[in-house]
Amino acid sequence: QVQLVESGGGLVQAGGSLRLSCVSSVIDFKMKTMGWYRQAPGKQRELVARIDPAGNTNYADFLKGRFTISRENAKNTVYLQMNSLKLEDTAVYYCDLAPPPLARYWGQGTQVTVSS
């Protein structure tokens, strides 16, 4: 059974930073495109960033360079460095396969709350 375990969320003031981690038991992790998703209250889950096996990255337009996704294949881990956090970044953050049609395993997520 595939497990995805996200961590690193918390309460942070606007303008602050957090680094999220996701440890995955996905088979052949290094060959998978992984993504970070988020779901804010009352909204649909959305893809924030993704990284392919070669390390190529893609980000949602609304991020404007504030987040950075990376991976460490030896640890089956994907990271999301979040800088200049805004109130609207408040959400539960998840990792899973990307693009969205491939996402299917969904872990428990990690809560990110940005305060003013």
Image (cartoon, helix red, strand yellow):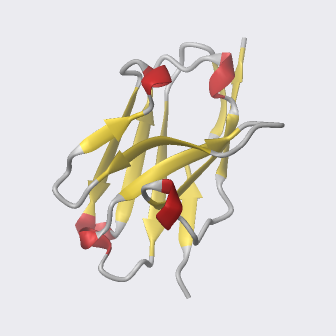
Query: Residue at (20%, 51%) from the top-left corner?
Result: 55
Q: Position of residue 10 (x, y in %)?
A: 66, 38
Let me know if residue 112 appears in the view.
no
Query: Residue at (25%, 71%) from the top-left corner?
Result: 31
Count the numbered circles shown.
0
Q: Is residue 96 left or right of residue 42?
A: left
Of all residues, the one furthest to the right in this rendering is 42
Q: Position of residue 110 (x, y in %)?
A: 65, 50
Q: Position of residue 39 (x, y in %)?
A: 69, 43
Q: Depth check: 102 or 79 in front?
A: 102
**Quarter of the rendering containing residue 87:** top right
Q: Is residue 38 left or right of residue 95?
A: right
Q: Does 110 sit above or below residue 27?
A: above
Query: Residue at (56%, 58%) from the top-left corner?
Result: 6
- The quarter of the image holding the C terminus is top right
Let me know if residue 76 appears in the view.
yes
Query: Residue at (60%, 17%) from the top-left corner?
Result: 86
- The quarter of the image holding the N terminus is bottom right
Of all residues, the one furthest to the front in this rendering is 101
Q: Is residue 75 left or right of residue 56?
A: right
Q: Does 43 sit above or below residue 15?
A: below
Q: Depth check: 18 or 45 in front?
A: 45
Q: Position of residue 92 (x, y in %)?
A: 68, 44
**Quarter of the rendering containing residue 25:** bottom left
